[in-house]
């Protein structure tokens, strides 16, 4: 999922300062998991905005706002309401915000779209409702087959591909002593699998052209272009 | 002179270390900056001096400019080059620049993470790692860039690397060391380690790589510094016995005590290695007596002239 945290309320109110009528769009996918933009958080934000003198023209939380297949069927019937609003506030990731903008444009509307969250990464939920971890940075060329299913690109603070730096102590990363050193995890895992030989293989520098932004995925062809 | 030539002759190699200042060092004919003077003061006792590259991710004068200043002052520099702040284009370019400016030795490092330094909000680069950097540097020595394009003139650099004998699990560190050797490392300086037993078990396993190893000897100046290192410097552990010894003398006696400990460690470790790399943390004046003592005691090769 895409992790999000709430922006401070003052920042949201400052962004909405010029507008009185606000439409609220959440996301009942990732933002629900992060408790930043699911149905409940949208309702809570609606109350807060009303307390601060705003009129909430509608509230919605599509199942996956970043996916037009889910958000268009929810927002399109609300076109009149969107038109009535002075601005939209999206409680979701940066993708949800931009898809909302894209959809309003296709409805022939030019409306300010504001964001109520900060996006903090492609994260995996480890403890529901409590902890999500960044484990993959979408490098475009997955190495997990050779690293015991633990990603060095993401979980090593320096993205080292050929083994640990000298800084780990007691199994912890030099950058953050509360975090395991990814390379020690990889080593232990490969040892348990009887595959430590894999560690001896030299890995060439990564091809960062595979991560060049912005990437476009052509789903039918299974092709990425950037 | 390339350290590899000294090792090939069987010379027991001594190196020191200086850290460039935070500031421009255009002297306009005035006296050289302190780190140059510190290096010059030990130049008859060491074969070369490491020049740190924005050490601990603290922004400083560039290690290449500082290396050139040392060279001009008659001290052989070891240009430290980290992957933290440069992508592969900048790394290759800096290696060619170094050779162009007369640098003979380069130490290829990953670099401390930006989070540990004074510009925590900077973008960490880490485009390549230290093993890949060694391969890239070897390629430049052979006359081609990492994409295989020919160079008008190859570089001619001795390639050094680092290894941490105190790392656990040691086998994982040795796998990385072996990779470094395979990709071009011609000599190693070790991270600071104070336990001869740990060091010996490392050396026994590392010997098979057939590459010269220099023992990393950190001069611990005070119990406070020991605590600071243990708390803040990753990968180094100052043992309790060393802290106790420093504590056993009043502050004014610490320098003598540090010399005594340094001498003892140097004597104990020297027979296991091909050189000693001193990390004096400003107390470079302790290096000459240690080197004199080892040369006097006839450490193999240590009698040879430095410089
Ligand atoms: S190697 Fe790591 S960053 Fe790349 S795709 Fe696999 S998990 Fe993601
Ligand atoms: S301690 Fe481990 S995880 Fe942290 S930067 Fe070094 S190798 Fe990577």
Image (cartoon, coloured by chain):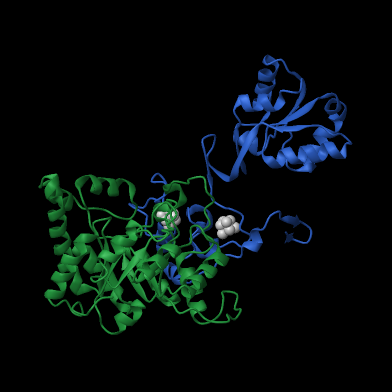
What number of labels is visible? 0
Q: Which chain is blue?
A: A
Q: Quadrant of residue B171?
A: bottom left
Q: Position of residue A106 (x, y in %)?
A: 87, 40
Is residue A16 found left or right of A141 in the rendered image?
Answer: right
Quadrant assignment for the N terminus of chain B: bottom left
Q: Nearer the viewer, residue B204 or B72?
A: B72
Image position, residue A186 (x, y; %)? 44, 59
A21 on left or right of A28: right
Ligand 2 position by quadrant: bottom left
Q: Which chain is drawn using green?
A: B
Q: Position of residue A147 (x, y in %)?
A: 49, 62
Tell me the quarter of the image containing the C terminus of chain B.
Answer: bottom left
Q: Is residue B292 above or below residue A75?
A: below
Residue at (23, 79) in percent of width and height:
B305
From the viewer's side, name the closer residue of A197 and A83. A83
Asked whether, in this view, residue B219 is left or right of residue B118, the answer is left
């Amino acid at each position: 999922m895409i992790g999000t945290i709430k922006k401070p309320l003052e920042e949201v109110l400052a962004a909405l300062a010029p507008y009185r009528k606000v439409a609220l769009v959440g996301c009942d996918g990732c933002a629900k998991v992060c408790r930043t933009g699911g149905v409940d958080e949208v309702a809570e934000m609606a109350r807060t905005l009303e307390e601060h003198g705003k009129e909430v023209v509608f509230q919605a939380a599509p199942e996956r706002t970043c996916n037009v297949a889910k958000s268009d069927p929810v927002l399109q019937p609300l076109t009149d309401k969107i038109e009535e609003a002075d601005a939209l506030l999206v409680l979701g990731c940066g993708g949800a915000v931009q898809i909302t903008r894209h959809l309003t444009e296709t409805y022939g509307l030019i409306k300010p779209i504001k964001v109520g969250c900060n996006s903090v990464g492609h994260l995996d939920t480890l403890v529901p409702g409590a902890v999500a971890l960044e484990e993959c940075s979408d490098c475009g060329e997955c190495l997990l087959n050779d690293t015991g299913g633990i990603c060095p690109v993401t979980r090593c603070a320096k993205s080292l591909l050929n083994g640990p730096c000298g800084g780990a102590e007691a199994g912890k990363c030099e950058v953050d002593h509360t975090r395991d050193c990814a390379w020690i995890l990889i080593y232990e895992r490969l040892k348990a699998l009887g595959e430590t030989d894999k560690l001896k293989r030299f890995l060439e520098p990564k091809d960062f052209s595979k991560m060049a932004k912005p990437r476009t995925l052509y789903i039918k062809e299974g092709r990425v272009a950037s | 002179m390339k350290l590899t030539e000294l090792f090939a002759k069987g010379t027991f190699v001594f190196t020191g270390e200086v850290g460039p200042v935070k500031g421009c060092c255009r002297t306009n004919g005035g006296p050289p900056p302190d780190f140059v003077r510190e290096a010059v003061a030990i130049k008859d006792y060491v074969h070369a001096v490491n020049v740190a590259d924005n050490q601990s991710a603290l922004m400083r004068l560039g290690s290449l400019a500082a290396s050139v200043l040392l060279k001009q002052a008659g001290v052989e520099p070891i240009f430290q080059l980290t992957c933290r702040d440069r992508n592969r284009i900048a790394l290759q370019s800096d290696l060619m620049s170094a050779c162009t400016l007369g640098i003979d030795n380069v130490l290829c490092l990953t670099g401390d993470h930006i989070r540990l330094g004074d510009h925590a909000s900077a973008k960490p680069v880490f485009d390549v790692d230290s093993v890949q950097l060694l391969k890239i540097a070897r390629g430049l020595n052979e006359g081609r860039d990492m994409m295989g394009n020919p160079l008008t003139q190859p570089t001619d650099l001795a390639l050094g690397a680092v290894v941490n004998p105190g790392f656990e699990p040691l086998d994982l560190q040795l796998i990385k060391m072996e990779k470094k050797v395979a990709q071009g490392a011609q000599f190693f300086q070790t991270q600071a380690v104070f336990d001869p037993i740990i060091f010996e078990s490392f050396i026994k396993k590392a010997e098979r790589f057939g590459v010269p190893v220099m023992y990393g000897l950190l001069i611990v100046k005070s119990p406070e510094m020991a605590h600071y290192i243990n708390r803040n410097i990753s990968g180094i552990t100052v043992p309790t016995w060393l802290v106790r010894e420093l504590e056993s003398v009043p502050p004014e006696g610490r320098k003598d005590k540090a010399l005594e400990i340094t001498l003892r460690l140097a004597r104990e470790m020297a027979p296991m290695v091909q050189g000693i790399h001193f990390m004096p943390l400003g107390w470079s004046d302790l290096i000459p007596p240690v080197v004199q003592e080892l040369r006097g005691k006839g450490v193999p090769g240590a009698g040879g002239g430095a410089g």
